[in-house]
């Protein structure tokens, strides 16, 4: 009786751990990931922020911009290269699927932007 | 005689069959919920004019049942009545499960489930009843769980304290839920009586459900059960049904009397299928007949008839929950007093609601999940006593108030 | 002896239960006191947007404003009367008090109340009143509880039951299914100094029945219209203080 229960627990634990184990093992078995290829921006353009800043902090930047425009109704930053807000990036990075999506897919980030904003 | 609690064996064929059946219903509920969110909530019967449907009806029904269960457990926990101690653990466990079911119903009803666990706890609007209630509900679940734990650990002092907190919290939770509707400026919602009437209906439906659960559990597991405490709960039920009925009566009489709400009340009382639920479901089956049974000298002393009355009360309160949510939405606000809207691109005037199969499956799924958790809770936790007999050191209280 | 003990215990518990109930009522009471203090008119605000609709100039069978709104704001339509979204809709009303009164065509939209019931009940402030008086839904935050749709006494709020894939205006986002929606007076256009789509469309057909402007500016066209005409607001008795004014209602 007690033995039966113990073996049941072991089986349940193994079953629960199986997906994790599978993920770890299949990840380990995969060849090293190729370096990410992002479509280069349109020639002779420069980003609104230094590359390092935009690469690591673009989400914060976009969120701040969103809250400014949406919640405070302040659009003074939406001028020039940023006139279109979130989709201003389109000016240099024409294809979302070759730019935004590449990184986000690799990093397993689920976006909640492009269901509404056309990019 | 020492009261002993034990697990049920849970190895019989019916137990497994029931579990499988419930699991199947849960799967159907999960599937239809997923479908409604994958395709959009238009798969439900809800519309722009009736944006709350069956999930909300069921949610407030469960919330109510939860309070009633807690009252039964408080008979021991707060009032120290030893003859109800055998039912206290089951009752608290039920209260916990029902609140979880209610929360699940509300959560899966939201348009954006992905935001629902984050937003209510990161942005607040304490002017909104819906902002206060997530805190009340989640804390209620925690309090119930703590109450159950100390009760099962046998700590009498903390059982008493937590039981008291739980009962007070239940009243807060239910007033808050009633206020979701009562404080909104719609003709059939706006009412200061809605929170207390919500509490009263909650207590009566939950008490009735507990009678049924107790009878079913002890009968099905072949445990000896003393009649007297159950009959006394039946008396309690009668009083609660009276109070709930009185509040409903006052509320509707006021609406009928006041000029500004008379047309709305006429729609409520005589305006369509929901009126049948009011007269037949809530008044006749849910209040009058059970009262006749419970106050009848012989029927009120028969377990069988008390069980029948309990079924009627639960059904009546389900009707009442429907009547709280749907007719209030179906009745249109009067946008142009003295004018009527004859053409519009959307539905104006009295709106119609037909619940869809998906909603029904979702509701059944939640019920089945609670049932499953209840069954397996009985199997894993020491919830049921070996028997529920009158403690010998106590005089039979039921006799004192006139139950044979 | 035992009886009186029981009774005392019962009374004590009863009193505690009563206190709980008082607490349950006290909370909403306190919050609503705060509500009327916090949401009062803000005449100090530089800009307070409002709208005047002149029904005498509104052609009965014209839906220019409705169509322009759908185009500008990417509001889809599927022909489902029960669930389609209309930020602005046109209804025909007929008198129930007297016979022979000509029916009227009335554009209905969000009234941008100064005391908006929708913003009052929104649990997460996804719907809120901007400082310039526009009542707006933040679709980034809304979780789709639909309480605002229920609280609005003007049936001016809608819910995105379906995914909408009609996007006539790529410069403006659409909404995903599962969030609430209502007129925001084309805040994105007003903020850029342009007219809302419905107003522009109404001017485009030379009807000029709609006018949006600053209620706090005595020199604005809208202030003049309100001064010089007898204006009505919908259901003023509700105390919601709408900022959409009707001439000829």
Image (cartoon, helix red, strand yellow):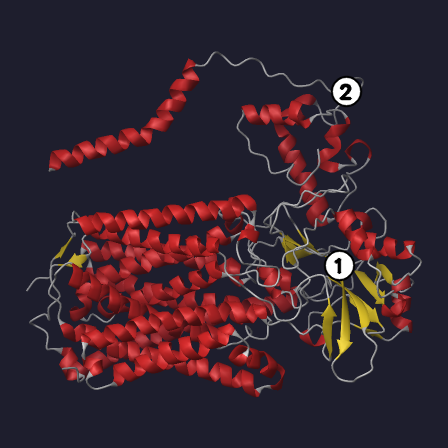
The C terminus of chain B appears in which quarter of the rendering? bottom left
In the foreground, C134 or C91: C91
As helix, strand or loop, the secondary structure at mark 1 comes to: strand
| Picture residue at 57% right of the left edge, 60% below the top | B51
Q: Can residue B381 be seen in this view?
A: no
C-alpha span from label 2 to label 1: 41 Å
The residue that label 2 is drawn on is A42
Mark 2, other Cα within 10 Å: few <14 / some 14–19 / many ≥20: few
Q: Give me the chain letter of mark 2.
A: A
Task: Give residue B148's quadrant in the image.
Answer: bottom left
Q: Can you say whether B164 is above or below B137 in the image?
A: below
Q: How crowded is mark 1: few (under 14 residues within 10 Å), some or many (20 or more)?
A: many
Image position of C190 with respect to C62: above or below: above
Q: Residue at coordinates 32% horizontally, 32% vertically from top-left?
A: A16
Relative placement, left or right, of B352 versus B168 is right
Place of residue B266 in the rendered image (x, y in percent of width and height, measured from the top left): 56, 82
Question: Horizontally, is C105 left or right of A36 in the view?
Answer: right
Q: Which chain carries label 1?
A: C
Mark 1 = which residue?
C88
Residue C31, quarter of picture? bottom right
Q: What SS does tag 2 mark? A: loop
């Amino acid at each position: 009786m007690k033995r039966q229960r113990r073996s049941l627990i072991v089986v349940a634990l193994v079953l629960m751990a199986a997906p994790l184990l599978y993920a770890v093992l299949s990840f380990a078995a995969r060849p090293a990931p190729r370096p990410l290829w992002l479509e280069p921006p349109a020639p002779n353009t420069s980003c609104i922020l230094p590359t390092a800043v935009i690469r690591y902090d673009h989400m914060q930047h976009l969120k701040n911009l969103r809250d400014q425009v949406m919640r405070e109704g302040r659009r003074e930053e939406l001028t020039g290269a940023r006139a279109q807000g979130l989709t201003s990036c389109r000016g240099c990075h024409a294809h979302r699927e070759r730019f935004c999506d590449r990184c986000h897919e690799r990093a397993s980030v689920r976006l909640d932007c492009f269901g509404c904003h056309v990019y | 005689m020492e009261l002993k609690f034990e697990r049920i064996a849970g190895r019989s064929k019916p137990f497994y069959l029931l579990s499988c059946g419930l699991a199947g219903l849960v799967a159907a509920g999960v599937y239809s919920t997923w479908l409604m969110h994958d395709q959009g909530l238009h798969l439900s019967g809800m519309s722009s004019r009736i944006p709350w449907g069956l999930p909300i009806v069921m949610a407030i029904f469960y919330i109510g049942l939860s309070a009633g269960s807690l009252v039964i457990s408080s008979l021991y926990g707060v009032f120290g009545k030893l003859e109800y101690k055998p039912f206290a653990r089951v009752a608290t466990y039920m209260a916990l499960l029902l609140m979880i079911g209610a929360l699940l119903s509300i959560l899966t009803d939201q348009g954006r489930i992905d935001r629902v666990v984050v937003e209510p706890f990161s942005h607040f609007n304490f002017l909104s009843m819906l902002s206060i209630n997530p805190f009340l509900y989640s804390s209620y679940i925690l309090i119930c769980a703590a109450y159950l734990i100390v009760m099962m650990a046998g700590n009498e002092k903390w059982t008493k304290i937590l039981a008291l907190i739980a009962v007070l919290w239940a009243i807060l939770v239910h007033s808050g839920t009633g206020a979701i509707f009562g404080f909104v400026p719609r003709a059939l919602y706006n009412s200061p009586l809605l929170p207390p009437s919500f509490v009263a209906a909650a207590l009566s439906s939950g008490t009735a459900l507990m009678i049924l659960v107790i009878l079913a559990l002890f009968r099905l597991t072949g445990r000896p059960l003393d009649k007297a405490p159950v009959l006394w709960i039946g008396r309690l039920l009668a009083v609660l049904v009276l109070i709930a009925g009185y509040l409903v009566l006052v509320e509707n009489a006021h609406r009928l009397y006041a000029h500004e709400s008379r047309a709305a009340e006429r729609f409520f009382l005589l305006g369509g299928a929901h009126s049948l639920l009011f007269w037949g479901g809530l008044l006749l089956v849910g209040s009058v007949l059970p009262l006749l049974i419970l106050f009848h000298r012989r029927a009120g002393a028969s377990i069988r008839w008390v069980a029948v009355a309990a079924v009627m009360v639960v059904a009546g309160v389900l009707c009442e929950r429907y009547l709280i949510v749907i007719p209030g939405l179906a009745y249109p606000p009067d946008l142009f007093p003295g004018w009527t809207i004859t053409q519009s691109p959307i539905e104006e005037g009295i709106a119609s609601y037909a619940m869809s199969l998906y909603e029904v499956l979702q509701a059944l799924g939640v019920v089945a999940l609670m049932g499953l958790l209840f069954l397996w809770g009985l199997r894993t936790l020491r919830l049921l006593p070996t028997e529920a007999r009158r403690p010998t050191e106590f005089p039979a209280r039921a006799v004192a108030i006139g139950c044979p | 002896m035992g009886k009186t003990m029981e009774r005392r215990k019962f009374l004590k518990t009863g009193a505690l239960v009563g206190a709980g109930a008082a607490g349950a009522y006290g909370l909403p009471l306190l919050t609503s006191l705060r509500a009327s203090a916090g949401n009062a008119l803000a005449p100090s605000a530089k800009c307070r947007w409002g709208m005047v609709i002149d029904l005498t100039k509104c052609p009965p069978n014209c839906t220019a404003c409705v169509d322009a709104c759908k185009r500008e704001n990417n509001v889809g339509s599927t022909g489902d009367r029960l669930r389609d979204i209309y930020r602005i809709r046109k209804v025909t009303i007929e008198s129930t008090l007297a016979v022979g009164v000509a029916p009227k065509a009335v554009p209905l939209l969000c009234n941008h109340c100064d005391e908006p019931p929708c913003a009052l009940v929104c649990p997460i402030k996804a719907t809120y009143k901007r400082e310039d008086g526009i009542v707006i839904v933040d679709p980034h935050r809304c979780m789709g509880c639909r309480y605002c749709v229920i609280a609005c006494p003007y049936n001016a709020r809608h819910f995105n039951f379906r995914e909408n894939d009609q996007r006539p205006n790529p410069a403006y986002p659409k909404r995903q299914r599962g969030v609430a929606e209502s007129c925001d007076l084309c805040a994105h256009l007003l903020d850029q100094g342009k007219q809302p789509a419905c107003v522009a469309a109404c001017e485009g057909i030379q009807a000029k029945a709609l006018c949006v402007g600053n209620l706090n500016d005595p020199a604005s066209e809208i202030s003049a219209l309100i001064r010089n005409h007898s204006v009505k607001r919908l259901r003023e008795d509700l105390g919601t203080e709408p900022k959409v004014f009707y001439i000829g209602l």
